[in-house]
Amino acid sequence: MPFKFKKSVNAFKEFSTLYHSSDKPYRCEDCGEAFNQRSALSKHKKIHSGEKPVKSTDCGKTFIQFSHFTHHQRVYNDKREHQRVHSDERPYECKKCGKGFKCSRALIQHQKIHSDEGPYECKECGKGFKYSTALTGHKRIHRDERPYECKECGKGFKCSTTLRVHWRVHRDDRPYKCMECGRDFKYSSVLTEHKKIHTGAKHYKCTECGKAFMRISYLSQHQRIHSDERPYECKECGKGFKCSATLFRHQRIHSDERPYECKQCGKGFKCNATLFRHQRIHSDERPYKHKECGRDFKYMSILTLHQKIHTGEKPYPCKECGKEFTQISNLSKHQRVHKDE
């Protein structure tokens, strides 16, 4: 056997053994994730550097890996398909919930949400998942493992994609604008969900009580109301929570951490949503409009209270005298009358 050919065969055997084994000798110094190939580690490192060397000549979009670019380029094979990337056209509609998609592949993947199919089961809690990657991410809940750390603020994440999404918190770019109210967003998915505020569309309905929601995540959280399930427990005080986001916000009670600061007045907040609502104090933005009288409001909660004026609804009765009130704050003020008697 010629020397070169023998060397190639040995190299292939070594590669094949390593590829199919669980041994992962190549470790990322930034986040600790291990790989069984040096090339896979090299591709992974681009996540931390932000490097996107592959560029589309059609639209200028850049990609970390060539495979991502190849997938993106398939959309351009059909001119009409390509145009949907740069527009809000979503011709593929889910018959279950009415949600629209730009391509048929995305619709097919989405439809699995509405089925009971969950072939990948967690051995810890028995929960089933439609995708193996979702199961892998879920397992970290039981281990509380957060290997992906943000270099800006030190916050840890359970998967690299969540870290990449989080990075935008430290940047001010908001490229996605709502044409209805002019509000800007960092992510197109958040803009899509925001648009439902203006349409009032609530496609996700609870089978227990009939209450409808704009997002399936809201429905999933709501459904825990009908059960006593509180799988997320605080290690400081032992309090249980129905969703991980609520636990994460609660943990700041045990610390003075207020990482979200208002650039206008310097006031700090424990969560980004509270900061966002606070910022409306410094502006004239009133995105929530009442259809009956045309009055504008800064917050959805105030619009909801205002609507009761037109409907005459008074859901808060006084137990002492039976008088009814539109708002619970008015009821509280009224009850002082009975205390002074």
Image (cartoon, rainbow, N blue to C red):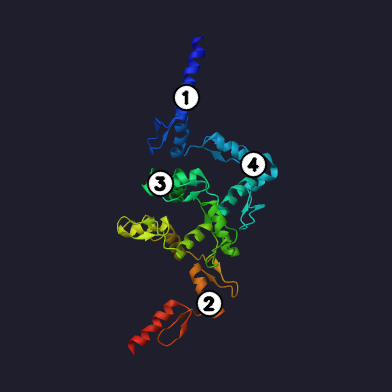
Q: Which residue is mark 1?
A: 15
The vertical placement of 244 against 337, above or below, is above
Distance from the alpha carbon under mark 3 to that under mark 2: 44 Å
Within 10 angstroms of label 4, few (less than 14), some, or many (20 or more) residues? some
* Quadrant of residue 235 within the rendered picture: bottom left
Q: Which callout, 4 or 1, points at the residue further toward the start of the chain?
A: 1
Distance from the alpha carbon under mark 4 to that under mark 1: 34 Å
Within 10 angstroms of label 2, few (less than 14), some, or many (20 or more) residues? some
**Res. 143 in view:** yes
Q: Which residue is mark 3?
A: 140
Secondary structure, mark 1, is helix
Q: Which callout, 4 or 3, points at the residue further toward the start of the chain?
A: 4
| Residue in the foreground of this view, choosing between 266 and 85 | 85
Distance from the alpha carbon under mark 2 to that under mark 1: 69 Å
The residue located at (49%, 43%) in the rendering is: 133
The vertical placement of 91 against 331, above or below, is above
**Res. 266 in view:** no
The vertical placement of 207 against 120, above or below, is below
Q: Which residue is mark 4?
A: 75
Q: Which callout, 3 or 1, points at the residue further toward the start of the chain?
A: 1
The residue located at (50%, 74%) in the rendering is: 305
Apparent side of residue 173 relative to residue 258 in the rendered image (left or right): right
Q: Amino acid at mark 3?
A: Arg
Q: Residue furthest top?
A: 2
Q: Which residue is mark 2?
A: 308
